[in-house]
Image: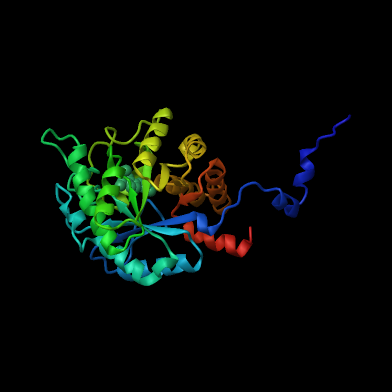
Amino acid sequence: MDIRERPRRLRRTEAMRRLVRETHLTPSNLVLPVFVREGATAPVPISSMPGVVQHTPDSLRAAVTEAAELGVGGVMIFGVPAQRDANGDAACAADSILADAVRWTKATTGDALPVIADLCLDEFTTHGHCGVLAPDGSVDNDATLAVYERMALTLADAGADVLGLSGMMDGQVGAVRDALDGAGHVDVTLLAYAAKYASAFYGPFREAVESQLTGDRKTYQQDPANAIEALREVRLDVAEGADLVMVKPALPYLDIVGRVADEVDVPVAAYVVSGEYAMIEAAAAAGMIERERAILEVLTSVRRAGAQIIATYWASEVARLLRTSGA
Ligand code: PBG
C-alpha cells in the first residue's frame, strides 16, 4: 500500500482539527430576532417556538442588554400591534409598537448593538399581507411602496440603524432609499430580503406575530424551485442601493446563499427562520438529536455556504456557548 495522501492526519486531535478549521462561528455574526407585543405586561410564550417569547418593554431591555454583553452582532425587531388596519397606517404611526421598541432598544444598548427594524406591513394589516390591497384583492405593489416610504421615515426617526425590507415588493429598496435620503437619513442602512421564498418554514413566525393571513404570499415571495430568479432579485436590490442582502429561509436554500455570495460585493445574510428553529427544538425535545451539536452544525453550515451574517433565534444562547467553549 502506497498511500501518500492521508487527510486523516489533520483530524487526529481536537487541536489539530481546530488549526485547519475553515469556518468559524463568532457571536458578531449572529443577529437576534425579537418580538415585542404592544400592551403585554408579562412575556408571552410562543407555543411553536419553545424558548421564544413576545416581549414586554422590560423583557426586551433585558434581552438586548444580554445580547450586547455577549457580543451578539445585532438585534432585529418585529412589532406585534394591538390594532390593525387595511392600509398599514398603524405601521406608520410615530408611536407604533415597532417604533417604540426601536427607541427602547436604542436607549438601552445605544451603538453597541445595531438595531434592525422590520419594514413590512404584514404584522399591521387586518388581512395579513405584506402590502396594501387593490380593489380586486391583489397586493398593490406601487401603492405599497408609498406606505413603506412613510414607515421607513418613522423607523429612521425612532433611531433604527438598519431597516429590514422583508416585503418583496418590486422597487422597494430604491423607493425607501430615496425617501430616507430626501429626509436626510443618509446613514440609515438597508438590509434587503433580496431572495425571500414563499416557504412553509414561516409557520411558527405567523403565530409569533399573530398573523391574520389567510391564503399565501406566492404573488410576491419567490417560488422555492427558482435559483436564477434569486440572482435577479439580488442584482436589482443591490442596484437600488441595498447595503446588505439576505436569503431566507437558510437551510433549504444553502445553494442560493452560496451563489449569492459569489455574485455580490455587499455582505450576505441568511435567516434561519422559525420553522427551522422549531424543527430542531422538536426533534431535540423528542430525544432524536443532540440539541447543541445540531444547532452549531446548522449555523456553521450557513456560514460555510457564504453567509457572513446569520439571523437566528439561538443568537444569544450560541454566543454564550461559543464564549464558554472557546470554539
Ligand atoms: C414578513 C416576515 C416573515 C418572516 C419574517 N418577516 C414571514 C412571512 O413572510 O410570512 C419569517 C421569519 C421566520 O419565520 O422566522 N414580514
Q: Quadrant of the N terminus?
A: top right
Q: Quadrant of the C terminus?
A: bottom right
Residue furthest to the right in view is 1
Q: Where is residue 259 in the image (x, y as percent from the top left)?
A: 50, 34
Side of 132 where 271 appears, left or right:
right
Side of 48 where 170 appears, left or right:
left
Vertical order, 254 against 94 (above or below): above
Side of 108 where 141 appears, left or right:
left
Q: Position of residue 146 (x, y in %)?
A: 19, 46
What residue is drawn where x is 85% and y is 32%? 3
Q: Where is residue 280 in the image (x, y as percent from the top left)?
A: 48, 47
Is 317 or 95 nearer to us in this picture? 95
Is 103 or 323 nearer to us in this picture? 103
Q: Can residue 204 be seen in this view?
A: no
What residue is drawn where x is 32% and y is 52%? 118
Vertical order, 27 against 251 (above or below): below
